Every structure is written in structure tokens, then in C-alpha cells.
Image (cartoon, rainbow, N blue to C red):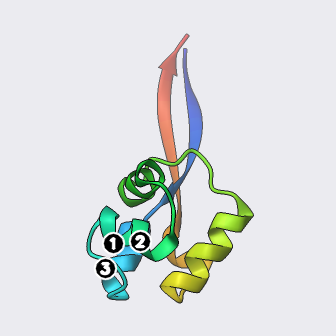
Amino acid sequence: MDSIIEVTMVKYDIAGVAIRKDKAKSSYELQNLLAVTPRTAIRLWRGQMNSITNKMIDLLCRKLECLPGDFIVYESDKKKSKK
């Protein structure tokens, strides 16, 4: 019997917003803009963050002059599982 497992994903498109807003063109520029560590900047740029704190969301919104909905993307992924 097949069942459907729904996996919800929240992804972050910080690089896309930074480029569109002409605020940063690389993780290095994002690092300087936000005053964060290189590792954090790279993970933000690549969208590899598992979660982002409210403090970081506030910082991103202020520095990128955007709203959280501009870089937080919700995707629903349905996968079939055989039992």
C-alpha cells in the first residue's frame, strides 16, 4: 500500500534578495554588510541554514531593506512511501 508523506521545507533565498536589492554580490560582501563570521555568511548565502533566529531576521531585514517574506520561501514536498 502506498502512502504519501508530506515534508514541509522552509528555505532561505538571502542571496537572491541581496543581489536584487544591490546590497551584496557575494558571501564576502554579505559578511561585511551583516558583520557576521565567514561561515555564517556562506551558509546564509547558500541557503544552508536550518533555522534563523529572530535577531538574524531583524538584521537581514534592516540591512537588506526588505521583509522576512522576501527571503523566507515555503515549499511543500510530497513523497510516496511504500508500506
The quarter of the picture where the N terminus appears is top right
First in residue order: circle 3 vs circle 2 = 3
- In-image side of 13 versus 69 (left or right): left
Residue drawn at x 51%, y 68% as measured from the top left: 35
Using a 10 Å C-alpha cutoff, classify the residue at mark 3 as few (fewer than 14 neighbours), some (14 to 19) or many (20 or more).
Answer: few
Residue drawn at x 63%, y 56% as measured from the top left: 52
Looking at the image, residue 21 lies above or below residue 47: below
Q: Position of residue 71 (x, y in %)?
A: 50, 71
Pick the residue in front: 53 or 13.
Answer: 53
Please name which of the two marks, 3 or 2, marks the residue nearer to the observer.
2
The three-letter code of the residue at mark 1 reads: Glu
Looking at the image, residue 81 lies above or below residue 7: above
Residue drawn at x 51%, y 61% as measured from the top left: 36
Please, which residue is most extreme toward the top here? 83
Mark 3 touching mark 2, by CB under 8 A? no
Which quadrant of the view contains residue 19? Answer: bottom left
Which quadrant of the view contains residue 29? Answer: bottom left
The three-letter code of the residue at mark 2 reads: Asn
| Number of the label disc, if any, that sits on residue 19 | 3
Q: Position of residue 50 (x, y in %)?
A: 57, 44
Q: Position of residue 63 (x, y in %)?
A: 53, 83
Q: Label 2: state its secondary structure.
A: helix
**Residue bearing mark 2:** 32
First in residue order: circle 1 vs circle 3 = 3
**Residue bearing mark 1:** 29
The three-letter code of the residue at mark 3 reads: Ile
Pick the residue in front: 6 or 69.
Answer: 69
